[in-house]
C-alpha cells in the first residue's frame, strides 16, 4: 500500500505507541490536520486485524491504543474459530500466520480449520472465507503428510 507522507507519519506514530495509552487528537495534531489525521487512523484500523490495536471514542476526539493479545484473552477469544476473526481481509491476514512447526501443532490447526469451515458453512456461508479456510486446511494436511510425520 502506497501512503502519502502525512499518512506514513501517522502510521509511524501508531507503530511507536504503547498499549494502554490514550491520546486526545487536538493535542497531537494541528487543527487544520485533524481530518487528515482521523482519516489516516481510520486507514490504519481498516488495514489490520482488530484495528491494529487502535480504537476511537464515539466522537473521534480520542484514540486509545490496546494490546491485541491481551484484548483477545480478556474476551475469551484467543482460540476462536478462524471464520470468527472479522472481515475476509482479517481472516486472510490471520491465516497467513498459521505456520505450525510440529506435528501436534499441525494436527491442532487442522482440527481448528475443520471446525471453522463447518461453522462458516452453517452460519455466514461466505464463499471466499470457505475457500480461504479450505486452502489453508489442504496446506496443513499436506504438511502433516509430508514433513511432520511421526
Image (cartoon, rainbow, N blue to C red):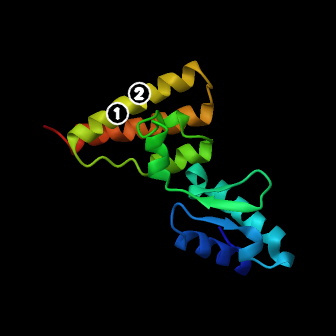
Locate residue 88 relative to residue 4 in the image: left or right: left
Disc 2 element: helix
Locate residue 71 relative to residue 147 in the image: left or right: right
Please state, as top left, top right, bottom left or bottom right, where the C terminus lies in the image. top left
Question: Which picture quadrant has residue 103?
Answer: top left
Disc 1 element: helix
Using the image as rendered, state which of residue 14 and residue 20 is in the foreground: 20
**For the point 46% across and 42% down, which residue is it?**
74
Coordinates of residue 38 in the picture (x, y in percent): 76, 65
Q: Which residue is mark 1?
A: 110
Locate residue 73 relative to residue 2 in the image: left or right: left
Residue farthest toward the left in the current orientation of the protein: 150
Whether 92 is drawn above or below 24: the answer is: above
Coordinates of residue 49 in the picture (x, y in percent): 56, 51
Locate residue 118 relative to residue 49 in the image: left or right: left
Whether 119 is drawn above or below 58: the answer is: above
Q: Residues within 10 Å of mark 2 (few under 14, many from 20)?
A: some
Coordinates of residue 8 in the picture (x, y in percent): 66, 76
Q: Which residue is mark 2?
A: 114
Using the image as rendered, state which of residue 91 and residue 41 is in the foreground: 41
Using the image as rendered, state which of residue 69 and residue 97 is in the foreground: 69
Q: Are marks 2 and 1 in contact (CB under 8 Å)?
A: yes
Whether 84 is drawn above or below 62: the answer is: above
Coordinates of residue 33 in the picture (x, y in percent): 82, 76
Report the number of numbered marks. 2
**For the point 48% across and 22% down, which residue is it?**
118
Residue farthest toward the top in the current orientation of the protein: 122
Question: Which picture quadrant has residue 126?
Answer: top right
Whether 111 is drawn above or below 69: the answer is: above
Amino acid at each position: 500500500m502506497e501512503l502519502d507522507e502525512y499518512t506514513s507519519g501517522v502510521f509511524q506514530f501508531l507503530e511507536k505507541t504503547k498499549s494502554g495509552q490514550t491520546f486526545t487528537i487536538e493535542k497531537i495534531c494541528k487543527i487544520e490536520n485533524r481530518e487528515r489525521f482521523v482519516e489516516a487512523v481510520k486507514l490504519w484500523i481498516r488495514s489490520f486485524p482488530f484495528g491494529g490495536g487502535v480504537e476511537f471514542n464515539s466522537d473521534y476526539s480520542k484514540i486509545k491504543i490496546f494490546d491485541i493479545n491481551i484484548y483477545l484473552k480478556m474476551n475469551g477469544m484467543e482460540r476462536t474459530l478462524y471464520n470468527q476473526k472479522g472481515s475476509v481481509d482479517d481472516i486472510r491476514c490471520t491465516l497467513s500466520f498459521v505456520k505450525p512447526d510440529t506435528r501436534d501443532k499441525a494436527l491442532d490447526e487442522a482440527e481448528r480449520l475443520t471446525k471453522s469451515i463447518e461453522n462458516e458453512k452453517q452460519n455466514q456461508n461466505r464463499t471466499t472465507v470457505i475457500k480461504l479456510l479450505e486452502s489453508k486446511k489442504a496446506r496443513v494436511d499436506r504438511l502433516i503428510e509430508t514433513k511432520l510425520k511421526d
